[in-house]
Image (cartoon, rainbow, N blue to C red):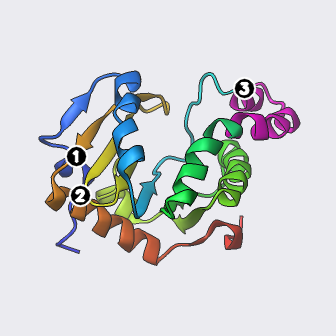
């Protein structure tokens, strides 16, 4: 697959936001302007979600409470999902799976069920060399006008991220996402 580029090479000259708050603030424009498609690639098996009361219950070992709190936590995104549905924007998410499945991912699958009800389509693939060589960062692509590449530390804390506006680089991310998705299955069909 010599025509693939790693996310590390794509971010080499990109604008970097050195803190999570500034990085997430830069999402406002893409969310507003997207008209056709959002692609989201996740690469990690666990993330830290400080401030998320459902996640914090999970961390405290109370899985049942974590599940009970999910609808309340996810409701924060309902307006965004409704806006995407009204604009008829397709929202696709892919992620690799490493066995054994982490407790975090079991919890996140429950989050995905709520996202799916709001129109998101989620796909899982077995972890493979694409994630070791090319998909080294999480990213989101909004149509072909903007890409956001996330910078997580080893523990799964978001540190900031890169913003890409160069269409040639965005096309490289779209190609990488498409190849990963081509070997993925709907998350509900994945045998956990």
Residue that lies at the very extreme toward the bottom in this rendered image: 182
Q: Report the Cα–Cα distance between label 1 and label 3.
A: 32 Å
Q: Report the Cα–Cα distance between label 2 and label 1.
A: 7 Å
The magenta segment is 53-74
Residue for badge 3: 53
Give how far across and how far down residue 175 sits, in percent.
Answer: 29, 69
Q: Which mark is residue 164?
A: 1
Density class for disc 1 (Cα within 10 Å; few <14, some 14-19, many ≥20) is many
Residue that lies at the very extreme toward the left in this rendered image: 13
Label 1: state its secondary structure: strand
Residue that lies at the very extreme toward the front in this rendered image: 86
Secondary structure of the magenta portion, mostly?
helix
Residue for badge 2: 170
Image side of residue 135 versus residue 90, left or right? left
Image side of residue 135 versus residue 69, left or right? left
Density class for disc 2 (Cα within 10 Å; few <14, some 14-19, many ≥20) is many
Q: Earlier in the sequence, mark 1 or mark 3?
A: 3
């Amino acid at each position: 697959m010599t025509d693939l580029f790693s996310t590390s090479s794509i971010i080499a000259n990109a604008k970097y936001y050195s803190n999570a708050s500034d990085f997430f603030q830069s999402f406002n424009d893409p969310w507003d302007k997207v008209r056709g498609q959002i692609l989201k690639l996740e690469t990690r098996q666990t993330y830290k979600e400080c401030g998320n009361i459902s996640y914090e219950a999970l961390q405290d070992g109370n899985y049942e409470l974590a599940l009970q709190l999910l609808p309340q936590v996810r409701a924060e995104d309902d307006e965004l999902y409704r806006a995407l549905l009204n604009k008829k924007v397709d929202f696709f998410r892919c992620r690799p799976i490493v066995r054994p499945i982490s407790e975090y991912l079991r919890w996140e699958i429950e989050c995905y069920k709520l996202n799916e009800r709001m129109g998101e389509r989620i796909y899982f693939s077995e972890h493979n060399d694409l994630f070791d060589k090319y998909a080294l960062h999480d990213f989101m692509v909004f149509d072909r006008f903007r890409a956001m590449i996330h910078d997580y530390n080893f523990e799964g804390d978001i540190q900031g991220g890169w913003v890409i506006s160069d269409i040639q680089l965005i096309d490289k991310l779209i190609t990488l996402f498409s190849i990963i998705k081509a070997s993925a299955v709907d998350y509900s069909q994945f045998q956990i």
